[in-house]
Amino acid sequence: MPDQCTHSPRAQARMRLAPLVALLLSGCAVGPDFTRPEAPAVERYTPYPVPAETAMAPVSGGAPQRFAVTRDIPGEWWALFRSEGLNALITEAFKNSPSIAAAETALRQARELTLAGEGAFFPTAQAGFSASHNKTAASLSPVTASGSLYYSQYSPQLSVSYVPDVFGGTRRQVEALTAQEEAQRFQLEAAYLTLSANLVAAAMTEASLRGQVAATEEIIRIQRESLDILRRQQWLGQVAGAEVAAQEAALAQAEALLPPLQKQLGQQRHLISVLAGRFPSDQPAASFDLASLQLPQDLPVSLPSKLVDQRPDVRAAEANLHAASAQIGVATANRLPQFTLTGNVGSTALTLAGLAAPGNVFWTVAGNVAQTVFDAGTLFHKQRAAEAAFDQAGAQYRQTVLTAFQNVADALHAVQEDAVALKAAAAAETAAKTSLVIAQRQLQLGAVNYLALLTAQNAYQTALSTRVQAEAARLSDTAALFQALGGGWWNRARTMEADTPAPSMIATLQWHGEPRSSEGGVP
């Protein structure tokens, strides 16, 4: 015998309402579901294949560098330059830099906004209590049963309101907030990478300037020795005064090159101090020269398909694209009917003791649905604006990817050409020095004219400075390659592990903190 309850009007009403309740509680989210862009279908960064290794130069810092496609980038890539002072300086900068603090604060703000947005999934309850003392006009009927013109009234109540996420507008809003938080997370990684790269570049520029200062001082020493020789020969009557005066002018010109280099060196030390979070007057103890920095021999070259996973700026642009996609769903949901459930329960009495009396309790339960009928196209155009913002974010993402590939291609090309340039500069320096030594010996013997000596001095001065700059360029462009490839942030110890929030109740992003496999489609 079938259960009669299943055929009762109340049971039938429950059966009819069940689909509506399910829709109210777990309705589908309108708007596009985000899929991450596919990696670019390119096989290499440059028009030509990367060689196995660079050229070699027979000088310090001239060893060949090997390109390793399968090698991963260490999280502390700057440690490959083998400088304890540089390692300590970057560690200090990570702790003290205002740019890092600002990026961390922006991430905390984004996290709190995400948590605040998730609060919309729950009802809102407000408790209130009102108390008043009143007097009724004598010409009117008394409002109290006792007939007294004076009375007090007490009314505690609890109000509950709930907006069901029928069409997923709230879920899309939380999805957008979560994506914005993800973008800030990668902005923080980008801040770490930028700061470390800037410090490495500043240290290498300081090393280059110190090398140029030393080269200039060497040229000044050589020209002073030549001037002493010419003065002795003038005293012996072997040369004219014009040749001595010309050498004095050449020495003065060489000495004039030194103050600008010293000025740049001082300014570079100020920059390093500020990057480390110090005032310029509080300079770090570590100083840098070319001898204190070792050129890494093995250079990782990530596959082009992995670059979009490794670059923090690309990942941030992708998260911004995700947020823009979710905002289309928010704008679409705003055009659909809006549901609201409200409840109110309380008590009112003339005395505090009377508030507990059953007869003084009141309550209200209500539901409301509203649909915009006419708004002169406001909500429609807001949806169109959200779609345009998504297209803009897609274009910005593609531009960021193109720039990332350009950065890697530039760095790879520079590393190869720097090795060739250093080899040529080393050969030129050796030849120029040999020519200068011969000219100096002949000058001492009186077998060469002053013009040949001056030519040899100028050639050696140029070759020596060029070799120093070429050696520094290899270091700088190697650091630029590490930066262009993403800096290995996925291998660096997490700096905010204790502050990482619990997983969102509405999981929209599953790929936090490490490169992920390619999936999804082109936006």
Image (tube, rainbow, N blue to C red):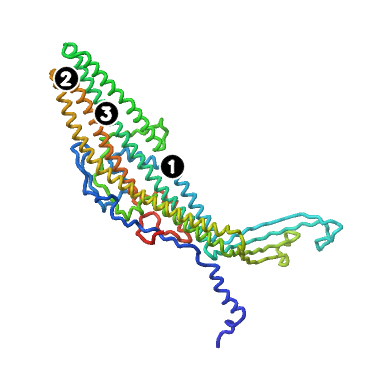
Q: Please identify the quadrant where the C terminus is shown.
A: bottom left
Q: Assess whether mark 2 and mark 1 are in contact (beta carbons under 8 angstroms).
A: no
Nearer-N-terminus badge (3/1): 1
Q: In which quarter of the view is residue 427 placed? A: top left
Nearer-N-terminus badge (3/2): 3
Q: Is residue 201 left or right of 65 when viewed as pictured?
A: right
Residue named by callout 2:
449
Q: Is residue 104 above or below residue 368?
A: above
At x 59%, y 82%, the residue is 5
Q: Is residue 446 left or right of 194 when viewed as pictured?
A: left
Residue named by callout 1:
99
Residue 440 shows up from this direction: yes
Foreground of the two, 199 or 519: 519
Q: Residue furthest front?
A: 376
Real-space Cα separation, disc 3 to disc 2, in angstroms: 28 Å
At x 54%, y 67%, the residue is 25
- Circle 1: residue type: Ser
Q: In which quarter of the view is residue 282 placed? A: top left
Mark whose residue sits in front, 1 or 2: 2
- Circle 2: residue type: Asn
- The local secondary structure at tag 2 comes to loop
Q: Is residue 153 left or right of 381 when viewed as pictured?
A: right
Real-space Cα separation, disc 1 to disc 2, in angstroms: 60 Å
Crowdedness of circle 1 by 10 Å Cα count: few (<14), some, many (20+)? some
Residue 75 shows up from this direction: no
Real-space Cα separation, disc 3 to disc 1, in angstroms: 34 Å
Crowdedness of circle 3 by 10 Å Cα count: few (<14), some, many (20+)? some
Foreground of the two, 57 or 514: 57
Mark whose residue sits in front, 3 or 1: 3
Q: Which residue lies furthest to the right in this view?
A: 139
| Residue 295 numbered mark, or none | none
- The local secondary structure at tag 3 comes to helix
